Amino acid sequence: MEATSSSTAAPEGTPQEHKPKGRPLAAVTILIGGAGLLVLALLVSISVGSISIPLGTVWQALFHFNPDVTDHQVIREVRLPRALAGVLVGAGLSVSGAVMQGMTRNPIADPGLLGLNAGAGFVLAAMFAFFPNMSYMTLILYSFVGAGIGAGLVFGIGSLSKSGLTPMRLALSGAAVSALLSALAEGIAVYFKIGQDLAFWYAGGLAGIHWTQVKIMFPWVAAALIGAMCLSRSITVLSLGDEVSSGLGQRNGLIRLGGTLVVLVLAGAAVSAVGAIGFLGLLIPHIVRYLVGVDYRWVIPCSGLFGALLIVVADIGARVINPLQEVPVGGLIALIGVPYFLYLVRKGGRGIR
Amino acid sequence: MKMSPYGHLAQRSRKTIWTALILVILILAVFLLSMNLGAVRMTPQDVVKTLFGGGDARQHLVLFTLRLPRIVIALLIGAGLAVSGAVMQGLTRNPLAEPGILGINAGSGLAIMLYASYFPVVTLGTAFMMPLCALVGAGLTAVLIYGLAFKKSEGLSPSSLVLNGIGIAAGISAAMIVLAVRLTPEKYQSVYIWLAGSISGTTWNYVLALLPWILILVPFVIYKARVLNVLVLGDKTALGLGANLDRDRLGLLAAAVGLAAASVASGGAISFVGLIGPHLARRLVGPNHKYLLPVSALLGALLVLTGDTIGRSVMHTGEVPTGIVVAVIGAPYFLYLLAKAKA
């Protein structure tokens, strides 16, 4: 499945050559550099907006907070939660994409393409309609359930066929399940006249994020990210194929179960907070594997970092391009993600058939 | 050469005639039922009386101005989408190809959304402007997908066509959501209902705008049925049999896009009809396009009319857009096909 490793990976023939090539040096460089860039992007993100606040004030608001200064209030109550939510969502979506791609050996796995977003969207539409006053905590739990329904349908139906779960079948199954669940969500939206509310949410934006959301989301996302790291070694082995993995004494079913839980929690939390941001989970792991190789112990943390960085930068873009009416971040990311997906399809050959 | 698909020609054509006859009877039955159902209930006697000139003014209005154009357009849309799907399946040699999956709906939708964003949505003239917009959107999308999927070395591989379609459709959906958020709530509601696939509020003008497309393109495609039969056998065989591949393929693709675009323009994004119509037709009358295309048209018409009738009679207070009803019936069937498909 790895187009990127073609130049470096040894031919997979004999057992001892199955050890995948990673590039720890590149990965460490990227992690350090990326973390620096992320801090910089966060500072910029906090300072730009409808009123721009000089970096010095940002510094003061963070470390010498004075509740009487309006700028400090804006930073603490509006900008900071927004930036942190971006980090959580971006890391969550990218890592869930990386875990999915590793587990399924499928280069086009992405929470958006595989029905998770639509599933969460459907359940959320039903919740908006029937229980408009529910708490954010309940909302998050239900979007996990929705993501699970979507993913379960896509993978279940995709793998029912005799020839198994090919990337093509997974994509079609994802498209059909998404169409079904979106149709049901639309039906609910039209009937209860909550269409544009739902569209705002679908559009994927970080505007209007509050501390409550960040606080509720944080433990879930953190736990799932740690879980992903614990699984990373097993996923690397699993990405070499089921036989290799069980030959090395791994319990494939158990790893898949753990991986699936991680994916559902990460995608569900992201979708419940900012709506359907597609293509991020597809794009980032590919770029990362290109840079650091196919060892998921490096791929997962680098993906998390890059995903967070991309979304924070895209969110800055969303506010700068049209300050009066923000461009939804999801749209901006699709602008990069779609061409990349098409490029992957065009390169075809390895994996996508 | 194997003769199996075209072996029992006489038997096939007899079977087609019977199938078509049964479908026409079913369509007539739903047609009659559909005239009776709706917010204003009319008994069958009332309907018959009104049809032949009797009935009061209100019954006249309900039947001739509200229900009949809607029923007719449902039939036309269903036929158009199903025939378009049948042609696309033949061209891509992929039984899962469908205008919706291939991004045609999304392309038309984006064009209509742009139109709604920058021009006031007025009733006069829009009946003719909307199809034009949708046609341009669908055409550009088709060209884009076709162009991206085409490789000089391998030509047009069916799977790359489908995957490109899915990618482009996802991208267009994202763009549409971005536009949707910017619309005023009133405009949004009308565009949204349109996008969900609704044919409520159809007037005879819409019927007149769609009719020529169906009347010209469906017979054209049926006339080209032989070419489709040859193309299905694969490029090499088709070349060997002397088909002018590129020109025929382009003509048929243009016809399929035209049919899908005109239908989508009149009825919004109704997906899955183009998949299920041809598929059921293939089961009933076999793979010969001469029989497959007309039976697909009838099945599509029946499906959309039934979906619309259900959509406006299940709820007392409002209606469910037709596209949603059709998707709820169609998507599970698509998934069933996917699970069963061999390769």
Image: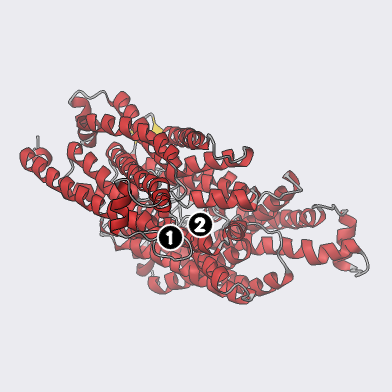
Frontmost residue, A34 versus B338: B338
Q: Is residue A213 above or below residue A205?
A: below
SS for dot 2: loop
Same chain for mark 2 and mark 1? The answer is no
Which image quarter: residue A31? bottom right
User: Which label lies toward us, 2 or 1?
Assistant: 1
How far is mark 2 from mark 1, CA to CA?
A: 39 Å
Q: Amino acid at mark 2?
A: Gly
**Which mark, by number, is residue A32?**
none
Which image quarter: residue A209? bottom right
What residue is shown with label 2? A112
Frontmost residue, B108 versus B116: B116
Evaluate whether residue A105 shows in this view. Answer: no
Image mark 2: chain: A
Residue B59 screen position, x and y as percent? 39, 53
What residue is shown with label 1? B39
Q: Residue at x 18, y 40 (%)?
A: B291
Q: Is residue B130 above or below residue A138?
A: above
Residue A176 screen position, x and y as percent? 39, 55
Q: Is residue A315 above or below residue B11?
A: below
SS for dot 1: loop
Q: Amino acid at mark 1?
A: Ala
Q: Residue at x 57, y 63 (%)?
A: A271
Label 1: few (<14), some (14–19) or many (≥20) C-alpha neighbours in 10 Å: some
Evaluate whether residue B117 shows in this view. Answer: yes
Residue B134 screen position, x and y as percent? 48, 37
Is A68 positioned to the left or the right of A137 in the image?
A: right
Label 2: few (<14), some (14–19) or many (≥20) C-alpha neighbours in 10 Å: many
Is A303 positioned to the left or the right of B87 in the image?
A: right
Is A194 positioned to the left or the right of B300 in the image?
A: right
Q: Are marks 2 and 1 in contact (CB under 8 Å)?
A: no
